[in-house]
Image (cartoon, rainbow, N blue to C red):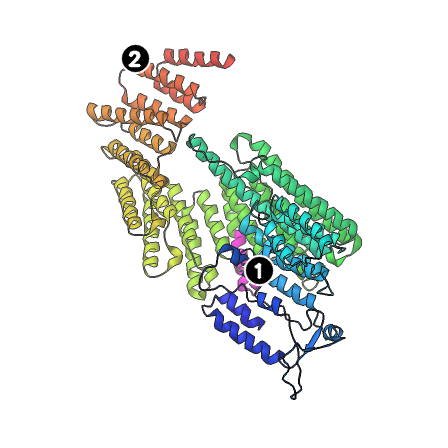
Amino acid sequence: ISLILNHTHSSKMKHHRSVISVAFSLLFVHYRDNYSFNCDLFCHGFSSIPSRKPLASSKRRTRQISPLLPILFEGGDGHYFEPVTSSKTNDKSSPKIQPNSRQKSISRGRDPIISLNMNLDYLAKSNQKDAAFRAEELLLRIEALHEDGYYEKSPDVCSYNCVINAFCLDSSRYGHGGIGRRGGVVMSTVRGYKNNNSKDQEGTLEEYATTNEELIGGATSNAERLIQRMMQKGLTPNDITYNTLLRCISKDMDLVGRENLNNQSKRRDNRSNPKTESKPSASVSTRTAQTHQNLLVQKAESILSKMEDLQIANTISYNTMISILSKQQHPTSHNSNNNNKNQAEESVRQAEACFHRMLSLSTATSDERIQPDTCSFNSLIGAYAKIGASIPGAKERAIRAEDLLRQMENLYRENPEGNKSVKPDVVSYSSVVSAYAKASMWGEEGCALKALEILKMMEELYEGGEEGVKPNKRTYTAVINAFARTGQPENAEMILSNMKRRYELSRDVSLKPDTICFTSTIDAYAKKGGEEAAERAENLLHEMENLYNMGDKDVKPNTRTYSAVITAMGKSGLPRAAEKAEQILDEMEYISSCGSKDLAPNTILYNAVIDAYARSTTIGKCNRAELLLERMIEESNNGNMAIRPDTITFNSVINAAARSSFGDYDVRKEAYMIGLNAFKSLHRSDYCQPSSITYVLFLRVLENLMESEESRDYMAGKVFELCRKHNLVNDAVVSQLKKTCSHDTFYVVTSSQCTHRKK
């Protein structure tokens, strides 16, 4: 029956009712002459089978409250039933009760609490909607029935651990604030099961319901609430309880990190559009994400210390703690690189301290429960690899990650049989590859080659029979990105070709190049620039389109793919490259209008085409750039916010005007007016603001297109004054001002700037 119901849930079969009838048939064939069962709980076992018609929310909560696996145990209500077998009577009354039936049932290994725990565990891992709430509801129902005397036994530590695990697994679905808002629903349902005579217990439940309704939310708070309740019930949390609580903290660290990224995106939107009333998430509005994570880290450290005092800490405890420490986020502002580096180093230092703490305890106590394993090393290596590439010290972190990898290899080689638990796997090697790939962002060519060296080592080990170190798509993509960042697209394409060859030989899906692999290679050519790079980027795009048209959905080009190709064309310097880029844009517009909404052009794509015109030698390129800007403004005013112009858009149009220094007087005058209009429109815009680059580019317009020195000096002074008013003056602006105006004007303008700074 369990297999049937598991198959029903996993395969999402359409004919659920027929499957239920088969399960019932099997049940009654087995039980009709021997046992009885608790019909109430058994029916709940099928309550999560979806019906053909959607239920109202209130009915859904009542009917879909239990896991698929039914609670099957005889004597679930404390008695053992046997049907009346006498043929001389037609009495249809209740079956006779034999007194010691429950002891007989339990002696046969059929403990109802075990069945309950099986249900709770299955529901926790079922990935069903509201699984955690439903698991808690089932737990509280059994507790209430036990308090009423209906059950002899009450839920045990394992029962609570299953529900805590359900909240941990369910946290990714709801996030901070999502869990806890339905706390009152659980208790209201439980009170429906309460006996009206149980007035003393009712007060306790009311208090618990009130506490539940005031929950902030999050997996950690729900886990702590359940642990507190189980201790009130006289149950002692064990190592599984606390380890699951640590996992809840780890999940909440992830959630806070994701919310922080979302809020950063909203803040960027607010800066570009001051009128937008986009507010950060309430769960992180009062404190920064870093403060939230620091509180979670402190909580995790106190839990681990408590486990150490109770002597129940094990390898899982320390591994989870290292993972929590590695998830601390750090600011990525380039204005405080030294501070960012110090904070990043501090989080890694904490992870290292936890790792060495485990090592020292393991050595001192010879306790096998806290022996470092592959997961321990991987967690620490991951701590090095997870730090953002924009934070200085990436190469040093990659070297330290590789040192840990070599330590794992040495430990395993010393005793292959005894040290199997520290054998490096694909995660170990891939994390080191990722660390070197991030270090390559700083122009370290040796880092990309180091990543390639480790990849080749993985291939050799796999070909030698080591199945656990087989490179996957993430490994290959990391190496491709490493070469892309160092301006080596040929090496990036070599890795892509290697992936294609290996996939064709093995048909291994984990080695099949996808859209990300192709796009990363195209992006490598776009960053390099040049005629050959544009040609190779376009060829790779055509290869993706052909494969997709032949039915390979994994290589469907996306907007980032087309954006990279357009960028490569813009940097090629080829005749009519900008026109070809605009043609691709028009084709995407047509495809999206036919239903492929995922290929609808966005602001980034339009900016790439405008930039392609700015870099081209096409006569009238300034007019084409202005027409694209006008199209974006018109479409966004009509509701298509995906292509609303931003600061980069206006800057690109100004740049196109600045590069239009060739041609006769009329062409140059028209280019100047286009640049001036874009400059004014940006300052009048409600949704974006000028940057320092804006003033550099417009000063370049004055330098290249305004012939009168007197007018040029006058305009340059006004532009610089406007730049100073917006507090955007930097070295690039001052340098361009010096090229644009006369020496005397430059001295006067910059002197006033110095006077303003002193004030």
Residue 671: which quarter of the image? top left
Q: Could you say where residue 167 lies in the image, as x and y percent from the top left?
A: 61, 53
Q: Could you say where residue 641 lies in the image, as x and y percent from the top left?
A: 36, 39
Residue 395: which quarter of the image? top right
> In the rendered structure, which segment of residues is drawn in magenta?
453-467
Q: Is residue 389 above or below residue 123?
A: above
Which of 210 and 96 lies nearest the eye of the viewer? Answer: 96
Taking the spot 45% from the left edge, 14% from the top edge, the residue there is 753
Q: Is residue 630 above or below residue 501?
A: above
Which label number is shown at residue 710? 2
Which of 186 and 657 lies nearest the eye of the viewer? Answer: 186
The amino acid marked with disc number 1 is Ile
Asked if residue 460 lies in the magenta stretch, the reply is yes
Q: Is residue 66 left or right of residue 678?
A: right
Which of 58 and 626 lies nearest the eye of the viewer? Answer: 58
Q: Is residue 686 left or right of residue 621?
A: right
- Label 1 residue SS: loop
Residue 441 appears in view = yes
Q: Which residue is mark 1?
A: 65
